[in-house]
Each structure stands twice: as structure tokens, then as C-alpha cells.
């Protein structure tokens, strides 16, 4: 029998109220539970004493027996120093880029740093003025003369 310390919803529509309960992990969210160990009322201000009430002795007992809290309840218990804080990783190790990709990115970054310097020095040496042609010579100027004849 695996036990969870989790929230069971109560209250009216759009007025939630939660009980913190110890229940079997196969039972429904609002179904049968073993023991009620606290309450959580998200409708009151954060600094209000009735927002979160927990029977710390009973929670310690159930944790020692092997009950596992859900993520939200773990956060509540960590705020009360009953458990270590929940570790959230920025990036999973699985999604880290491979060795070859890291090497290619390093090479691309190194070559990108040297290329602008080379281009800037070569452009300074070989600058030549470009001759512009008048707009009359390009385009439909010849066609208008043929239409006039």
C-alpha cells in the first residue's frame, strides 16, 4: 500500500478549499483517505494564519512511515522546514547537446570572431569607387523613342 500526502479539493464552484490528506495513491482525488493532516485555503491572503494549517507531528509520522508528498504539498512542507526544499533543475541532463555539436559550435564561434577582422582589413585595402549610370540609359528610354518614330 503506497501512501501519498496530497490535496483533496472541497469548497464551492470558484471558491476552492483543500484538505491535506494521507491517502492511497490509487484512490481518487476527493475520495477515501486515511487521515486528514491539514488544510489549505488559497482564497485568503498569503500572510493570513488560516491559509495553511498543518499538524506537524502527524506529517512527520507519515513521512517516517513512507508516505510521499505530491509536488505542491512538498513545497508547503518545505516552507515549514519539515522537508528539504524541492530541487528544480534548469535543464535536464538528457537534453544537453552532444560532444560533436559542442565542438562544431566552438569552431563556428572561433571562425566567426576572426572573419570580420579579415573582411574589414581586406575591404579597406581594395576600396574602389563604383560608377553610377544615369537612369535614362537604363530602362524604357529606348522604347519610347521607337514608339515616337
Image (cartoon, helix red, strand yellow):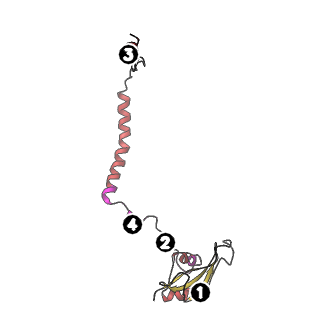
Q: Earlier in the sequence, mark 3 or mark 4?
A: 4
As measured in the structure, the alpha-carbon distance from the residue carrying label 2 to the one carrying label 3 is 77 Å
Q: State the CA–CA distance, disc 3 to disc 4.
A: 69 Å
Q: Earlier in the sequence, mark 2 or mark 3?
A: 2
Horizontal arrangement in the rendering, residue 114 relative to residue 24 (left or right): left
Mark 4 or 2, nearer chain start: 2
Which residue matches tag 1? 36
Numbered mark located on residue 93 in the image: 4
What residue did someone put label 3 on? 142
Q: Quadrant of the N terminus?
A: bottom left
Front in this rendered view, residue 27 or 128: 27
Can you give x and y, in whole percent of width and height, for residue 27 in the image? 50, 85
Give the crowd class for mark 3: few <14, some 14-19, many >=20 residues within 10 Å: few
Q: Nearer the viewer, mark 3 or mark 4?
A: 3
Question: Above or below — where is 12 with respect to 127?
Answer: below
The question of residue 61 being in magenta is answered with no
Which class describes the residues within 10 Å of circle 4: few (<14), some (14-19), or many (20+)? few
Q: In percent of the image, x 53 and y 77: which residue is there?
A: 74
Residue tagged by mark 2? 87
Q: Which residues are magenta?
A: 76-102
Magenta run includes residue 94? yes
Q: Whole-Å distance between the Cαs marked 1 and 4?
A: 38 Å
Amino acid at each position: 500500500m503506497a501512501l501519498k500526502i496530497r490535496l483533496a479539493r472541497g469548497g464551492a464552484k470558484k471558491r476552492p478549499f483543500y484538505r491535506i490528506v494521507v491517502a492511497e495513491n490509487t484512490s481518487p482525488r476527493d475520495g477515501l483517505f486515511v487521515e486528514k493532516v491539514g488544510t489549505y485555503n488559497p482564497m485568503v491572503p498569503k500572510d493570513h494564519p488560516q491559509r495553511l494549517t498543518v499538524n506537524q507531528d502527524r506529517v512527520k509520522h507519515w513521512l517516517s512511515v513512507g508516505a510521499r508528498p505530491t509536488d505542491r504539498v512538498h513545497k508547503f512542507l518545505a516552507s515549514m522546514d519539515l522537508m528539504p526544499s524541492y530541487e528544480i533543475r534548469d535543464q535536464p541532463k538528457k537534453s544537453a547537446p552532444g560532444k560533436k555539436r559542442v565542438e562544431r559550435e566552438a569552431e563556428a564561434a572561433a571562425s566567426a570572431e576572426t572573419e570580420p577582422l579579415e573582411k574589414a582589413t581586406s575591404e579597406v585595402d581594395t576600396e574602389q569607387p563604383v560608377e553610377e549610370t544615369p537612369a535614362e540609359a537604363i530602362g524604357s528610354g529606348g522604347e519610347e523613342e521607337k514608339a515616337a518614330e
